[in-house]
Image: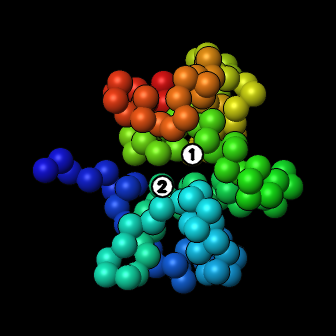
């Protein structure tokens, strides 16, 4: 069995994450119900990883800074093939390497997605990327 990346290790309870994010735990449950995030479960307890927290911060940003509703957030995150892939390395700065300047990276604030051509029209889900061993870059 492969070793789990520390960033993907589920270790924060919903109350801890809600406190970190300064949101009510019910907000996190609503985001989960809308399939924006899928925390791990131990028995019936939700456990969030560092990666989950980064996703939640991006969701929070889209809702509270950009004014999107849940449908809008769902539409945006569906365009990120790496949203459901655990080994995403994050984004890059404009001057470091070619990036998609119209798509800020959800994982690394202040950077942009390394996927230059948006391939979201190629599939309805990330199944294409998983089957073809693709990642963010």
Per the image, the residue denoted by label 2 is 51
The answer to whether residue 65 is visible is no
Above or below for 14 versus 132: below
**Image point (56%, 66%), residue name:** 32
Q: Depth check: give the residue in front, 28 or 89.
A: 28
Does 44 sit left or right of 64 as displayed?
left
Residue 118 location, x and y as percent?
Answer: 63, 23
The answer to whether residue 135 is visible is yes
**Image point (42%, 42%), residue name:** 85
- Displayed quadrant of residue 21: bottom right
Does 3 sit left or right of 44 as displayed?
left
- Displayed quadrant of residue 6: bottom left
Residue 56 location, x and y as percent?
Answer: 61, 60
Above or below for 92 versus 35: above
Per the image, the residue denoted by label 1 is 107
Q: Among all residues in the image, which is located at the extreme front?
A: 124
């Amino acid at each position: 069995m492969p070793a789990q990346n520390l960033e993907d290790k589920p270790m924060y309870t919903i109350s801890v994450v809600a406190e970190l994010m300064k949101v009510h735990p019910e907000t996190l449950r609503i985001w989960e119900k809308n399939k924006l995030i899928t925390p791990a479960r131990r028995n019936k307890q939700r456990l969030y990883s560092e990666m989950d927290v980064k996703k939640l911060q991006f969701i929070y940003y889209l809702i509270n800074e950009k004014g999107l509703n849940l449908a809008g957030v769902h539409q945006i995150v569906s365009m990120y093939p790496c949203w459901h892939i655990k080994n995403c390395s994050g984004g890059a700065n404009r001057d470091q390497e070619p990036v998609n300047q119209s798509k800020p990276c959800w994982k690394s604030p202040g950077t942009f997605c390394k996927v230059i051509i948006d391939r979201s029209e190629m599939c309805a889900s990330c199944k294409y990327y998983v089957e073809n061993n693709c990642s963010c870059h």
